[in-house]
Amino acid sequence: MKWEESKKEIKELGKKSKHSYQYDLVKREGNSAVMGAKKTIVARFDQLKSGHALIAKYLLQIGKRRDMKCWWCGHEYQTRDHLFKWCKRWKREQKRLWVDGQEGEDGYEGIEKVLKKPKISLPMSLIFAEEKCSQALMDFLSCTDVGRISRVVEEVENSDHEESSDGGV
C-alpha cells in the first residue's frame, strides 16, 4: 500500500522529461527558473555561480590549463565576467541577456532593466545571487556553450599539445 502512495506522490511532482523535473514549488519554495530547467543547464548554472565551472580561470587554478586565454574569442582572460558580458563569440546572446530580454509566456526582462544598472557596474556574483535574474541566465546558458568543454576547446588543447611535443615546429 505504501508503494502505491509513493508512486502516486512521484507522479504528482510532475515529471516533465528525462532531463528536467517540475518540483512542487509551493512546498519547497525554490527558485522556479532553476527548478524547472534541464539538469545539465542547472549544473552549469551552479558551477558558474560557485566559481567551479569549466572555464579557463578555474581550469588554470586546478592545474588543467597553462593560461587563462578565452578559447571562444582569444581574449587574454576567460572569466565569468568576460563570458557573460564581453566575449565576442556570444554578443547576440549577451544583448538578449542584458538588454532585450525575451517576450512571451516564459519571457523576462533584460538584466539591466531588472536591476536598473548598466552591466559594467554589476558583478556576476550579484547577478547569480539575484533570483529575478535566474531565468535570463538559464536562457543564456541554454543558448550557449559557456561553462561547457566543447570540441573547440579540445581542438585548441590538442593543437597546443602537438606544438609542445614537436618543439614548436
Image (cartoon, rainbow, N blue to C red):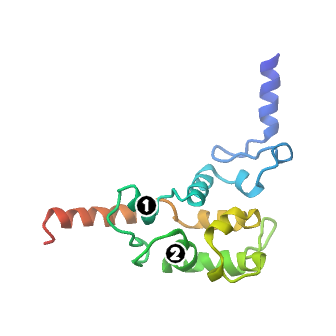
Residue that carries the numbered disc 2 in the rendered image: 82
Q: Would residue 25 be found to the left or right of residue 80 on screen?
A: right
Residue that carries the numbered disc 1 in the rendered image: 150
**x then y, percent, for residue 134:** 71, 63
What residue is at 35 percent from the left and 56 percent from the top? 63
Comparing 24 with 122, the one in front is 122
Which quadrant of the structure image shows residue 84?
Answer: bottom right
**x then y, percent, for residue 102:** 73, 73
Comparing 90 with 85, the one in front is 85
| Marks 2,1: beta carbons within 8 A | no
> In the image, is residue 101 above or below residue 160?
below
Looking at the image, the residue that sits furthest to the top is 1
What residue is at 77 percent from the left and 75 percent from the top? 114
Q: Residues within 10 Å of mark 1 (few under 14, many from 20)?
A: few
Q: Would residue 91 be found to the left or right of residue 106 on screen?
A: left
Q: Would residue 167 be found to the left or right of residue 54 on screen?
A: left
- Mark 2 lies on a secondary structure that is helix
Rendered-image quadrant of the C terminus: bottom left
Q: What residue type is labelled 2?
A: His
- Mark 1 lies on a secondary structure that is loop
* Sequence-first tag of 2 and 1: 2
Of marks 2 and 1, the one in the foreground: 2
> In the image, is residue 39 above or below residue 123?
above
What residue is at 42 percent from the left and 79 percent from the top? 75
**x then y, percent, for residue 6:** 79, 26
**x then y, percent, for residue 26:** 86, 46
Which quadrant of the structure image shows residue 76?
Answer: bottom left
Q: Would residue 119 be found to the left or right of residue 64 on screen?
A: right
Q: Which amino acid does label 1 sit on?
A: Ser
What residue is at 64 percent from the left and 52 percent from the top? 38
